[in-house]
Amino acid sequence: MAADVPAFANQFRKSHPEIWKAFNELAGACHEAGPLDEKSRRLVKVALCVGAAVEGGAHSAARNARAAGVTQAELEHVALLAITTLGFPAAMRARAWLSDSSGKKPSPTDRRAGK
């Protein structure tokens, strides 16, 4: 897991292992506490990060979502859904974050065409 974690978070994990462990246990308990399936939970986490404008969380949530079988098209749909709730600029910011975390950058042509 440490390899997937950004350097600053990995440093925190090493300097405060008891807090890191407790946080991860809480996250796991929350993740498993309700009726949503894995894919739905991952999409909700992405949407929460997008809505809260938490870039690092959006990157992490998108990586975890992909590992759970969520496709890039499904992640992009989350960004599109944000247009009417959060506004166009926030949705485009989310789209960029979710694209960043895929390792696939949209080309300038894709950006102009709205892809």
Image (cartoon, rainbow, N blue to C red):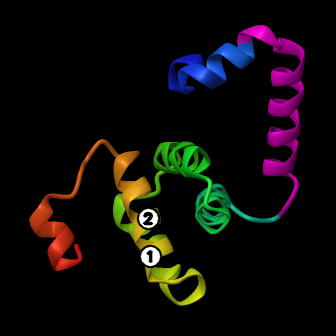
Q: Quadrant of the C terminus?
A: bottom left
Q: Write down the region rendered in magenta.
A: 14-34
Residue type at mark 1: give it.
Pro
Relative to 20, does residue 102 appear above or below in the rendering? below
Residue 1 shows in the view: no
Left or right side of 8 for 78: left
Asked if residue 19 lies in the magenta stretch, the reply is yes
Which residue is at the front of the view, 23 or 67?
A: 23
**Residue appearing at x 72%, y 18% in the figure:** 12
Q: Would you name the residue on which mark 2 appears? A: 93
Q: Quadrant of the N terminus?
A: top right
Which residue is at the front of the view, 47 or 29?
A: 47
Q: Do the residues labelled 2 and 1 touch (CB within 8 Å)?
A: yes
Q: Marks 2 and 1, Cα distance to the nearest angstrom? A: 6 Å
Residue 41, label in figure = none
Secondary structure beneath label 1: helix
Relative to 103, does residue 10 appear above or below in the rendering? above
Q: Would you name the residue on which mark 1 appears? A: 89
Q: Count the marks: how many?
A: 2
Given the current orientation, which residue lies at the most extreme top position? 14
**Dominant secondary structure (helix, strand or loop) of the stretch shown in magenta:** helix
Q: Position of residue 29 (x, y in %)?
A: 87, 43
Asked if residue 85 lies in the magenta stretch, the reply is no
Which residue is at the front of the view, 47 or 37?
A: 47
**Residue appearing at x 68%, y 59% in the figure:** 41
Q: Position of residue 4 (x, y in %)?
A: 52, 26
Question: Mark 1, residues whose alpha carbon is within 10 Å: few (<14), some, or many (≥20)?
Answer: few
**Residue appearing at x 83%, y 14% in the figure:** 16
Q: Where is residue 5 in the image (x, y as percent from the top left)?
A: 57, 26
Which residue is at the front of the view, 53 or 36?
A: 53
